[in-house]
Image: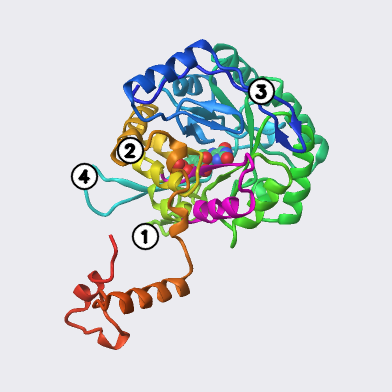
Amino acid sequence: MAGLEINMQPLRGSKVCGHLMPMPRYSPSFVKAITASQARDVPDLSVTVNGLRLPNPFVIGSGPPGTNYTVMKRAFDEGWGAVIAKTVSLDSSKVINVTPRYARLHASSGKPKEVIGWENIELISDRPFKTMLDEMRQLKQEYPDRILIASIMEEYNKDAWEEIIERVEETGVDALEINFSCPHGMPERKMGAAVGQDCDLLEEVCGWINAKATVPVWAKMTPNITDITKPARIALQKGCEGVSAINTITSVMGINLDTLRPEPCVEGYSTPGGYSSKAVRPIALAKVMAIGKMIKEEFNGQDVSLSAIGGVETGNHAAEFILLGANTVQVCTGVMLHGYGLAKTLCTELQAFMERHNFKSVEEFRGLSLEYFTTHTDLVRRQREAIEKRKAVRVGLSSDKEWTGDAFVKQTETMVSN
Ligand SMILES: Cc1cc2nc3c(=O)[nH]c(=O)nc-3n(C[C@H](O)[C@H](O)[C@H](O)COP(=O)(O)O)c2cc1C
């Protein structure tokens, strides 16, 4: 594959004050790969996140692409930097999925019709917990050098959280992602987004989790909240090593105007679902930017990480998230639409971006664009100062009274930046 292939040893350690103390161990093939990449002067895609070494920042996001042994093995074989398995809970008998459970939003033009939005009403894994544990254990035995992350969710019950952490860690997974963000189905049982949207609950549950876990913990955030930095800050303060953002956005895909029934339609009825794919990317970028800024300002110098998710389908999309502070970039719907081979394209495109800017490593450009976000008041001040300084004519209209009916579209064009 185009990205740097590194055979790596996951770094394990014990949590001290909620943070992992790394114990570096590099395999001979890892050292060889580094040396080879330096000799070729190719941008290095490898990243180290909370003591875990990934050959590239591309991670399978929790969902159908990580739902069983066969597909997770495929992801490793195709070169994904890490895999996050489909979310599991102790009692899968309470999880009952329906079909159809997906609905698409297409772009209005283009052939074949391009999918730009995706809604799902899928719950967490409905496979027996023990089966998922056996499959994760088998994967770690067969791919000891690759990073496998379990995604877990439990009810508001300390014993249940302790049990699930103990049993999942026993499989040898490298980290845990906590699903505090599933928007449908599970909140009815005080799970998922019900915890992620309630900072008091979140604080208590993160305390239980980090007192028990011995591997890095990422808290996956819901975007269905006014200020995503509040739960993200609490998760990090309570000892999580990282946050992931975003899970899906609450959505209603549409109403069929022949049947007058909502989509996806199950026996004539539907329920609000979670929105993903390309259309959510600008929202995900805004949430990741807010968390990226918060981490830079409040956790600078600490080994806390940010895993970005939402509408990624190209290496350039990933570069945008990394420029906003992401250490890794997850893809879920993109894999459902384009397959596991997408990893190679993502790596090639990200490397091309890095070469264009002469970036040698991901860390070299991570967070670089954060400083260019400011308040609207500051934009006005900067523009006023620039105009005064250069005595230049301002681009666009200088006042709202200059809008005209005839030139309306052209006038709009003069104020668009891309
Ligand atoms: C069909 C489907 C099932 C999903 N299941 C889970 C899940 O079990 N656990 C979880 O944390 N996120 C789940 N997600 C959310 C994704 O991991 C991801 O956060 C979201 O879809 C946005 O990323 P994307 O645009 O790359 O899909 C699911 C998403 C989809 C589309």
Q: Is 10 on the left or on the right of 39, as rendered?
A: right
Amino acid carrying mark 2 in the image: Asn
Q: Which residue is mark 1?
A: 257
Residue for point 38% across, 21% down: 37
Q: Residue 88's spot in the image, x, y percent?
A: 64, 32
> Which one is closest to the eye, mark 1 or mark 4?
4
- Work out how far the residue at label 2 is from the one at label 3, CA to CA, in angstroms: 31 Å
Q: Is residue 347 above or below residue 293?
A: above
Q: Which mark is residue 358?
A: 2
Residue for point 73% across, 29% down: 214
Q: Which mark is residue 111?
A: 4
Amino acid carrying mark 1 in the image: Leu
Q: Residue 418's spot in the image, x, y percent?
A: 28, 60
1 or 4: tag closer to the N-terminus: 4
4 or 3: tag closer to the N-terminus: 3
Work out whether residue 122 can be spotted.
no
Q: For label 2, count other residues whose C-alpha is less than 10 Å away and answer few (under 14), some (14-19) or many (20+).
A: some
> Which one is closest to the eye, mark 2 or mark 3?
2
Q: Is 373 on the left or on the right of 358, as rendered?
A: right
Magenta stretch: residue 304 in it? yes
2 or 4: tag closer to the N-terminus: 4
